[in-house]
């Protein structure tokens, strides 16, 4: 039986222009999904309100977070990143909150499957979300044996995920489940969060806040692989939906054209994160999308 599918994107004000480009590419090239949800903090709701429509809803992060976990507007990290605080967990960075919001939204919104999308994705090819994500078996993207024990961040994240799930120490090299467009099954997410609470004896959000160094995608992937019922309901694949550019040097028009041409046929989107400083105008042109309006750019600059 076909499962209902939605798209899910936690985002924030600094990713406004990238999110605008993502939405334009979704509206042009993505079909088959019931809805697209974006989750932002209350202060960003007016900025993102224009994206709401018949098939897209902007939701407040407060809907998914416990009341005791508070955004501290007076405390900001470098580059304007936000910080939360609770009595039980201490300070929590915005990046971790975005990971938590993915889990909470996927566990509580009405659809059965979620294609979790980062703001810096741009769809360059047609994509039927239900055909890919709504089949009986959920696709599980992984990069085999790509995490060494001393891999920066990923090694620690993997070990912490094993602890949160109550699993035996993993052997390295370990599989990586991180990507820019990942499919989650709702019941699997719910069972994963219940497992974290059973193991840690804490509410799952508190457990993740206290752990800090974790990856939501590594949690999901390792939970699936370690749980026979869920493992049997997933279809492993090494083919990513997104061609990701990780170099710090910006792509020019010619370089971007070559990069897209070299992408595998399964890659329906490209991602060039902000640190590469690849111009969004080039990504927009490559995806054959109309220019961003000057009013929206001005609004973003004002609120940033």
Image (cartoon, grey):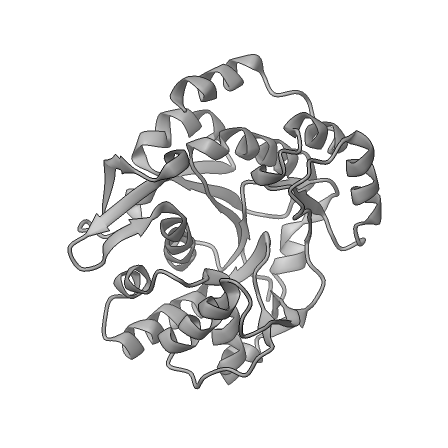
Residue found 79% across the figure and 50% down from its top: 263
Quadrant housing residue 214:
bottom left
In this rendering, is residue 173 above or below 204? below
Q: Quadrant of the C terminus?
A: top left
| Residue closest to the eye, 45 or 68 | 68
Which quadrant: the N terminus? bottom right
Please tell me whether residue 254 is drawn above or below residue 213 in the rendered image. Answer: above
Where is 171 relative to 257, above or below? below
Where is residue 276, by image quadrant?
Answer: top right
Q: Position of residue 38 (x, y in %)?
A: 45, 41
Residue extending furthest toward the front = 150
Residue at (53, 34) in percent of width and height:
19
Q: Position of residue 109 (x, y in %)?
A: 40, 52
Residue 42 in view? yes
Looking at the picture, how far across and down is residue 135, in whole percent?
Answer: 63, 64
Question: How many discs mark residues in the rendered view?
Answer: 0
Residue 117 placement (x, y as % from top left):
55, 48
Is residue 219 something one can see in this rendering?
Answer: no
Q: Is residue 73 left or right of residue 142?
A: left
Q: Residue at x 44, y 37 (%)?
A: 57
In percent of the image, x 72 and y 62: which residue is there? Answer: 239
């Amino acid at each position: 039986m076909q499962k209902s599918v939605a798209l899910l994107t936690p985002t924030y004000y600094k990713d406004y222009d990238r999110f605008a480009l993502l939405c334009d590419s979704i509206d042009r090239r993505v079909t088959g999904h019931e809805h697209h949800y974006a989750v932002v903090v209350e202060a960003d709701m007016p900025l993102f309100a224009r994206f709401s429509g018949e098939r897209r809803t902007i939701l407040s992060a407060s809907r998914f977070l416990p009341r005791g976990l508070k955004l501290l507007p007076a405390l900001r990290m470098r580059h304007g990143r936000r910080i939360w605080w609770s009595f039980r967990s201490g300070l929590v960075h915005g990046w971790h909150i975005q990971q938590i919001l993915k889990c909470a939204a996927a566990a509580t919104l009405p659809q059965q499957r979620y294609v979790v999308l980062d703001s810096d994705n741009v769809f360059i090819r047609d994509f039927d979300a239900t055909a890919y994500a709504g089949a009986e078996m959920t696709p599980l993207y992984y990069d085999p044996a790509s995490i060494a024990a001393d891999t920066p961040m990923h090694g620690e994240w993997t070990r912490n995920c094993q602890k949160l799930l109550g699993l035996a120490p993993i052997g390295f090299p370990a599989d990586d489940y991180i990507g820019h467009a990942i499919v989650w099954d709702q019941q699997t997410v719910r069972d994963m969060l219940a497992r974290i609470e059973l193991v840690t004896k804490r509410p799952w959000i508190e457990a993740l806040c206290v752990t800090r160094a974790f990856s939501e995608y590594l949690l999901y992937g390792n939970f699936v692989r370690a749980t026979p019922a869920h493992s049997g309901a997933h279809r492993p694949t090494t083919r990513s939906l997104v061609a990701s550019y990780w170099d710090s040097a910006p792509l020019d028009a010619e370089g971007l054209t070559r990069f897209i041409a070299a992408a595998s046929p399964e890659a329906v989107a490209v991602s060039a994160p902000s640190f590469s400083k690849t111009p969004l105008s080039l990504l927009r042109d490559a995806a054959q999308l109309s220019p961003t309006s000057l009013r929206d750019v001005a609004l973003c600059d004002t609120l940033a």
